[in-house]
Image (tube, rainbow, N blue to C red):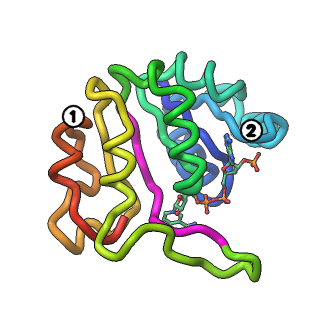
């Protein structure tokens, strides 16, 4: 199985390293392809770097390790390629402010998971990860069809 990891910052780097340590193949992409290439070189032969489009195309599972606003843009750009893929969303409904702090970007009680699931094609299989949904009996770590996730994802947290 091949996993595309879009974004090679804190979360993407860590997930990629764990997967490669477990013998899994990863395809890495980032805004600046040289950042993905640097991580692929560090991780060895199970890792490679390419464009976002090619990484999604080549993978069975796609982990979007990017901030929520970026994630929304990337889904809009690549929705067609996500049909039939398992899409893993670690995002929280936050963005960085000018002072390096974190601000909530969605209304209270609206989760990033519900927004992301709503943007995916119905044929994608949605997985919410690393959010706060476990606190609300939500979908953390479970695989569901995107259409089901739209109604099932909790109203708060990730
Ligand atoms: N950090 C945590 O502890 C934590 C915990 C739980 C959940 N999360 C969530 O995980 C997500 C990622 O957080 P992070 O801390 O890993 O972020 P980060 O360190 O800032 O990394 C963001 C990554 O996104 C890439 N990126 C930005 N725009 C892109 C684009 N248009 N196309 C492709 N890649 C793009 C960046 O590429 P470049 O490298 O080229 O700049 C970078 O590698 C966020 O949604 C966050 O809420 C984070």
Quadrant of the rendering where the C terminus is positioned: bottom left
Residue 148 position (above or below residue 110): above
Report the magenta residues as a range: 87-96
Residue 110, horizontal then vertical, whole percent: 32, 66
- Circle 1 is placed at which residue position? 145
Q: Residue furthest front?
A: 107
Q: Secondary structure at mark 1?
A: strand
Q: Secondary structure at mark 2?
A: helix
- Circle 2 is placed at which residue position? 36
Q: Count neighbours of disc 1 (C-alpha within 10 A) and say few if under 14, some if 14 to 19, many if 20 or more.
A: some
Say which quarter of the image contains residue 27.
top right
- Disc 2 residue: CB within 8 Å of ligand 1: yes
Question: Would residue 14 appear left or right of 139 to someone viewing this image?
Answer: right
Q: Considering only order in the chain, which callout, 2 or 1, is on the residue closer to the N terminus?
A: 2
| Magenta stretch encompasses residue 95 | yes
Q: Residue at x 57, y 41 (%)?
A: 73
Q: Residue at x 30, y 53 (%)?
A: 114
Distance between mark 1 and mark 2 Cα atoms: 29 Å
Q: Count neighbours of disc 2 (C-alpha within 10 A) and say few if under 14, some if 14 to 19, many if 20 or more.
A: many
Residue 75, horizontal then vertical, whole percent: 50, 35
Asked if disc 1 and disc 2 are in contact, CB closer than 8 Å, the reply is: no
For residue 10, the mark is none
Q: Residue at x 84, y 37 (%)?
A: 34
Quadrant of the rendering where the N terminus is positioned: top left
Q: Nearer the viewer, mark 1 or mark 2?
A: 1
């Amino acid at each position: 199985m091949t996993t595309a990891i879009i974004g090679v910052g804190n979360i993407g780097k860590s997930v990629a390293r764990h997967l490669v340590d477990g013998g899994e193949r990863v395809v890495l992409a980032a805004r600046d392809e040289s950042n993905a290439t640097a991580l692929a070189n560090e991780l060895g032969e199970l890792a490679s770097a390419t464009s976002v489009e090619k990484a999604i195309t080549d993978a069975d599972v796609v982990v979007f390790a990017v901030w929520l606003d970026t994630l929304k843009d990337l889904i809009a750009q690549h929705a067609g390629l996500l049909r039939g893929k398992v899409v893993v969303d670690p995002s929280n409904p936050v963005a960085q402010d000018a002072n390096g702090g974190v601000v909530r970007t969605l209304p209270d009680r609206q989760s990033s998971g519900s927004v992301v699931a709503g943007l995916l094609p119905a044929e994608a299989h949605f997985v919410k990860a690393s959010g706060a949904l476990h606190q609300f009996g939500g979908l953390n770590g479970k695989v569901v069809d995107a259409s089901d996730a739209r109604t099932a994802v909790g109203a708060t947290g990730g």
